[in-house]
Amino acid sequence: MIHLSRILCPTDYSVTSDKAVRYAIEFSRSVNAHVRFLHVHPPENIAAKTAAGYGLSVGGDDAFEVIPQLFSALLMSEKKKGLSADMHIMRGEAAKVIASHAHSWGADLIIMGSHGRTGLVRFMMGSVAEAVFRTADVPVLLVKQSGPEKAVRD
Ligand code: ATP
Ligand code: MN
């Protein structure tokens, strides 16, 4: 028997990936699973790090661990409604981090968008979706960017 207790939902916080987030929330609720959202930051900027090492000040905000307000608001309200969920933020190459975290955490399923921030629909799926689909050792459910939203009802 298939038992889905851990669902991993990677998100780049884009509108396209929000579709997968909403799907993952409803899916997890309906199978009584815990859902973990995962956002991956690009690897550390070596140039900035080197500059900092030489004593140069490096400006700009490091968005690390900053969760967009809309996203955290959605999470909070779903958690209040009883959803079992948490959020992870990691650094590295998105597809590699997603696939290896799915493995080490013991995810039973990955739910992600077919597209993300770039959103070029002429490709069947984006590069992160493609690489995760190819390399992950658990099933991957791709939520398409286009098409009717019959899966999620308000
Ligand atoms: P590309 O990045 O290849 O130009 P794209 O942005 O349209 O195309 P992907 O990046 O493959 O498409 O996004 C597909 C899905 O992968 C997203 O909906 C999201 O679930 C996941 N994803 C993409 N980037 C990240 C990231 N940095 N952190 C977590 N999940 C991500
Ligand atoms: Mn992308």
Image (cartoon, rainbow, N blue to C red):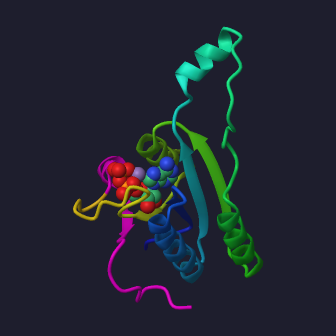
- Residue found at x 33% / y 76%: 146
Q: Position of residue 25 (x, y in %)?
A: 57, 75
Q: Is residue 47 left or right of residue 68?
A: left
Measuring from the top left, give residue 121's x and y in whole percent.
28, 65
Q: Residue at x 33, y 46 (%)?
A: 135
Asked if 136 appears above or below 86 in the picture, the reply is above
Above or below, 122 against 144 in this view is above
Q: Which residue is located at x 54 percent, y 75 percent?
A: 22
Q: Quadrant of the N terminus?
A: bottom left
Residue 45 on image: x %, y %:
55, 27
Residue 110 drawn in magenta = no
From this view, report whether residue 92 is shown above or below residue 137. above
Q: Residue at x 60, y 60 (%)?
A: 36
**Magenta residue check for 142:** yes
Toward the viewer: 15 or 5? 15
Q: Quadrant of the C terminus?
A: bottom right
Residue 132 falls left or right of residue 12: left
Residue 84 shows up from this direction: no
Residue 97 seen anywhere in this rendered image of the structure? yes
- Residue 145 lies, in percent from the top left, at 36, 71
In the displayed structure, 12 sits above or below 95; it is: below
- Total labels: the figure holds 0
State the extent of the magenta-drawn residues as a range. 126-154
Single out the residue that lies furthest toward the right.
Answer: 80
Residue 69, located in which quarter of the rendered image?
A: bottom right
Question: In terms of depth relative to the viewer, which is nearer, 82 or 71?
Answer: 71
Furthest-top residue in view?
A: 54
